[in-house]
C-alpha cells in the first residue's frame, strides 16, 4: 500500500512529465453573459411608453481583430472545420503583423462588443463550437 506522502510525490512527478507546450496554452474565456441597460433616444412618442427587458444577454460569438476593434479589421479564421456531432473547430494564426491582436466577444440581442487585447506572445487561437454555433472554449498559445 502506498502512503499519503509517497502518493503525493508520485503524482507530482507524473504531472511534471507532461508536455511543456500545454503549459503555454491559455484559455481565454468571454463572459458567458452580460447585463445591458438600454434607453430610448429620443424618448418614445406621446402616448407611448417604453418597457425594458432586463434579461441577461448570452454570448453569441467571437471575433479576432488586427488592431483595436474600433478600426473594424476582423481576421478570418485560417481554418474552420466541422467535427463530430455538428460541432466546429476554428483556428486563427497570428504574427504576420506587428499590430496587436484583440479578441471581441459578441452577445445576442445587443450591439455590445466586449474586447480585450491579447498578449503579444499569442500566435494562434482555437475556438471550439458546440452544435448551433455556441462557443464552448477558446484556447490561445
Image (cartoon, grey):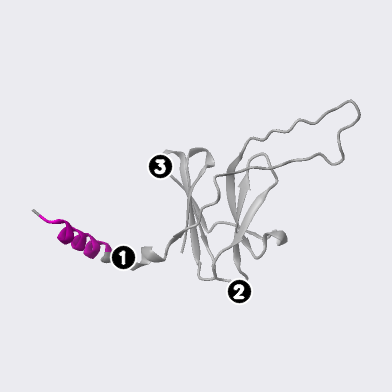
Q: Which sits earlier in the primary sequence, circle 3 or circle 1?
A: 1
- Looking at the rendered structure, which numbered label has been put on residue 84? 3
Compare residues 119 and 87 and report the one nearer the observer. Answer: 119
Could you tell whether 51 is left or right of 100 in the image?
right
Measured Cα–Cα span from mark 3 to mark 1: 26 Å
Magenta stretch holds residue 6:
yes
- Looking at the rendered structure, which numbered label has been put on residue 101? none
Image location (x, y in percent) of residue 69: 67, 59
Task: Please identify the residue farthest to the top as the structure is shown.
Answer: 47
- Looking at the rendered structure, which numbered label has been put on residue 19? 1
Crowding at mark 3 (Cα within 10 Å: few <14, some 14-19, many 20+): few
Callout 1 secondary element? loop
Callout 2 secondary element? loop
Crowding at mark 1 (Cα within 10 Å: few <14, some 14-19, many 20+): few
Magenta stretch holds residue 138:
no
- The residue at the point 50 percent across, 59 percent down is 125
- The residue at the point 46 percent across, 39 percent down is 86
Could you tell whether 46 is left or right of 91 in the image?
right
Measured Cα–Cα span from mark 3 to mark 2: 36 Å
Compare residues 80 and 64 and report the one nearer the observer. Answer: 64
Amino acid at each position: 500500500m502506498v502512503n499519503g506522502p509517497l502518493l503525493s510525490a508520485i503524482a507530482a512527478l507524473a504531472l511534471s512529465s507532461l508536455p511543456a507546450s500545454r503549459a503555454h496554452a491559455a484559455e481565454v474565456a468571454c463572459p458567458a453573459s452580460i447585463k445591458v441597460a438600454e434607453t430610448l433616444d429620443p424618448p418614445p412618442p406621446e402616448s407611448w411608453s417604453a418597457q425594458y427587458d432586463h434579461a441577461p444577454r448570452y454570448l453569441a460569438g467571437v471575433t479576432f481583430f488586427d488592431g483595436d476593434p474600433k478600426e473594424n479589421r476582423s481576421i478570418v479564421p485560417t481554418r474552420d472545420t466541422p467535427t463530430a456531432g455538428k460541432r466546429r473547430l476554428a483556428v486563427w494564426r497570428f504574427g504576420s503583423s506587428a499590430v496587436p491582436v484583440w479578441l471581441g466577444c459578441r452577445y445576442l440581442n445587443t450591439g455590445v462588443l466586449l474586447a480585450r487585447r491579447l498578449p503579444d506572445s499569442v500566435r494562434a487561437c482555437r475556438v471550439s463550437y458546440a452544435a448551433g454555433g455556441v462557443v464552448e472554449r477558446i484556447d490561445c498559445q
